[in-house]
C-alpha cells in the first residue's frame, strides 16, 4: 500500500463517522459526566477511597467498555474499507491511556458474561490498524480535574502501523514505540513537541546509551514536525537515517546544527517560518538535499548555499534578501531550476529579474524565477548584459597584463632583478 494514499483530511471523528458512531460518542461523554458526578460526590469520603477515585478507575472501565463494544461491532468493517480507501483512525490520549491502564488491572478481559465489551476487540484493532491519529486538547477534560495531555499512554499493541499522526498532545507521554520504529513510514507531529529527543529516544535509553547504539526508525521516509516548539536538532535526529522528506516549518529554529548531515537519504527539507538568520556553510550540514524551503525567516545573504550542488529547488520568499550580490552565488549551482524570491526587498531593485537571471549565465533560460520562466525579452537582455560583462572582463584582463609587462620592464631597467639574482644563495 503506497503511503501517499493516506488522506491527511480523511480522519474518522474519534472513532466512526456513522450515525451509530455519533450516538456512541454521546454515550461516551454521558458516561464521563456520570463518572465525574460520582467523583464530585466523593469529596467527603476518606482519604484512601478518594485517592482510589482519582486514579480514574471509573473512567477507565467506561471508556474501554464503550471502545470494545463499538470496535467489536464495526472495527472489522472499518479496517476492510481502509484497505481500499486508506485513512486515519482517530483516538484521544485519554482513550489510549484508559486502554493502557485497563490492561494492567488483574481483571477478566470482559466485564459481562456475553463478552460483548471484551477489551480483546480493542487490542486486536490496534494490532491491525495501519494509520492512527492521536488528537488531544488543551486544558481539562470537561469539568473534571483531568488534564488532557497529562496521561501516559502506550502504543505497544500497534504492530502494523504505517502512518502515525499526533496532534495537540505531549509526545513525552507516549511509550511502547518498539514495534512502531520498525513499521512506520510516515510520521506527523503537530503542537505536541519541544525537543525531537522527547519522541525519538526511549526514556530508558536516554543518557544510558549513545545514539549510535540506539534502535533506528528503520522504515520512516516522511516526517512532518511542523507547528511545534523546536529550537534546533539534537543528535537524536540521526535515528531518522532513512528519512527522505522532513518538514520542520512553523517552529522556533534558530540554527540547524551539524546533525542533519547524517541523514544521507534526505532530499527535501522544509524550514520555512522559523527564526533562521544565517545559512553559513550549509553544504557541510545538509548533504544532498534537492529541495529546500526557507520562506518566512530573516535571511539576508544566500552565499552559504553556494556549494549545495545537488539543490534543484530553493524557496526563500519572505526573507530580508536585499541585494543582487547576496543572490549571485547560488547562480553557480549546476542543478538549480526553481528559485523563489518573492516578498524580499530585492524585488525593488531596478531590472531585478534580469540581473538575478544573469547570475545563471548560459543556464538562465532553464531557470524558473518566482514561478515564471524566462521570456524572450528577458533572455535577450540577459545575453546583452553577459556580453557586456565579458567584454569588460576581457578589457580588465588585458589592462592587468599590460601593467604587469610595464612593471617587469621597470624592474629590469632599475636593476632590481639583477640585484636579486646576486643576493640569491649559490650552491657549489
Image (spheres, rainbow, N blue to C red):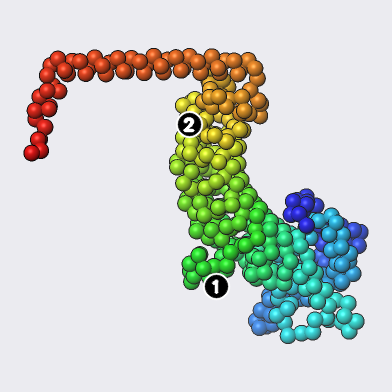
Q: Please provide percent x and percent y for residue 81.
A: 87, 59
- Assign a secondary structure to mark 1: loop
Residue 157: image x %, image y %? Answer: 72, 72
Q: Please report the residue visible at 68 percent of the width from the left and 75 percent of the height from the top.
A: 54
Residue at horizontal 61%, vertical 45%?
A: 268
Can I make out residue 182 in this image? yes
Question: What residue sits 48% from the left and 39% below the top?
Answer: 307
Residue 89 lies in what quarter of the image? bottom right
Apparent side of residue 118 relative to residue 250 in the rendered image (left or right): right
Q: Is residue 78 above or below residue 338?
A: below
Q: Circle 2 is placed at which residue position?
A: 329
Q: Quadrant of residue 250?
A: top right
Q: 118 left or right of 199?
A: right
Marks 1 and 2, Cα distance to the nearest angstrom? 47 Å
Image: 371 above or below 63: above
Check disc 1 and report the residue beneath it: 204
Callout 2: 10 Å neighbours few (<14), some, many (20+)? some
User: Which residue is more in the foreground, 164 or 195?
Assistant: 164
Mark sitting on residue 146: none
Residue 249 located left or right of residue 112: left
Q: Nearer the viewer, residue 14 or 205?
A: 205
**367 and 15: which is toward the camera:** 367
The foreground one among 33 and 202 is 202
Q: Residue at x 52, y 30 (%)?
A: 331
Q: Is residue 33 above or below residue 115?
A: above
Amino acid at each position: 500500500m503506497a503511503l501517499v494514499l493516506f488522506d491527511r483530511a480523511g480522519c474518522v471523528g474519534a472513532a466512526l463517522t456513522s450515525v451509530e458512531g455519533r450516538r456512541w460518542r454521546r454515550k461516551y461523554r454521558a458516561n464521563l459526566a456520570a463518572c465525574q458526578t460520582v467523583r464530585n460526590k466523593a469529596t467527603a469520603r476518606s482519604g484512601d477511597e478518594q485517592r482510589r477515585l482519582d486514579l480514574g478507575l471509573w473512567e477507565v472501565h467506561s471508556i474501554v467498555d464503550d471502545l470494545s463494544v463499538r470496535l467489536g461491532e464495526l472495527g472489522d468493517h472499518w479496517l476492510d474499507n481502509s484497505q481500499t480507501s486508506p485513512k486515519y483512525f482517530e483516538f484521544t490520549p485519554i482513550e489510549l491511556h484508559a486502554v493502557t491502564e485497563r490492561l494492567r488491572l488483574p481483571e477478566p478481559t470482559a466485564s459481562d458474561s456475553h463478552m460483548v465489551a471484551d477489551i480483546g476487540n480493542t487490542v486486536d484493532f490496534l494490532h491491525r490498524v495501519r494509520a492512527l491519529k492521536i488528537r488531544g486538547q488543551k486544558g481539562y477534560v470537561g469539568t473534571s480535574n483531568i488534564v488532557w495531555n497529562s496521561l501516559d499512554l502506550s502504543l505497544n499493541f500497534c504492530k502494523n502501523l504505517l502512518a502515525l499522526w499526533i496532534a495537540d498532545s505531549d509526545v513525552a507521554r507516549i511509550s511502547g514505540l518498539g514495534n512502531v520504529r520498525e513499521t512506520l513510514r510516515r510520521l506527523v507531529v503537530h503542537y505536541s513537541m519541544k525537543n525531537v529527543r522527547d519522541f525519538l529516544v526511549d526514556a530508558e535509553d536516554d543518557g544510558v546509551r549513545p545514539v549510535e547504539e540506539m534502535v533506528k526508525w528503520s522504515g520512516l521516509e516522511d516526517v512532518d514536525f511542523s507547528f511545534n516548539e523546536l529550537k534546533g536538532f539534537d543528535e537524536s535526529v540521526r535515528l531518522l537515517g532513512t528519512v527522505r522528506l522532513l518538514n520542520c516549518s512553523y517552529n522556533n529554529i534558530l540554527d540547524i546544527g551539524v546533525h542533519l548531515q547524517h541523514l544521507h537519504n534526505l532530499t527535501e527539507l522544509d524550514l520555512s517560518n522559523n527564526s533562521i538568520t544565517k545559512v553559513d556553510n550549509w553544504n557541510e550540514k545538509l548533504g544532498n538535499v534537492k529541495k529546500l524551503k526557507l520562506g518566512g525567516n530573516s535571511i539576508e545573504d544566500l552565499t552559504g548555499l553556494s556549494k549545495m550542488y545537488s539543490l534543484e529547488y530553493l524557496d526563500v520568499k519572505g526573507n530580508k534578501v536585499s541585494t543582487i550580490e547576496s543572490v549571485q552565488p547560488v547562480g553557480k549551482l549546476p542543478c538549480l531550476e526553481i528559485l523563489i524570491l518573492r516578498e524580499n526587498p530585492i524585488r525593488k531593485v531596478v531590472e531585478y529579474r534580469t540581473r538575478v537571471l544573469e547570475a545563471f549565465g548560459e543556464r538562465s533560460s532553464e531557470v524558473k524565477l518566482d514561478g515564471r520562466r524566462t521570456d524572450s525579452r528577458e533572455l535577450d537582455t540577459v545575453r546583452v548584459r553577459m556580453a557586456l560583462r565579458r567584454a569588460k572582463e576581457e578589457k580588465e584582463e588585458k589592462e592587468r597584463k599590460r601593467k604587469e609587462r610595464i612593471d617587469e620592464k621597470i624592474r629590469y631597467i632599475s636593476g632590481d632583478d639583477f640585484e636579486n639574482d646576486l643576493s640569491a644563495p649559490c650552491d657549489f
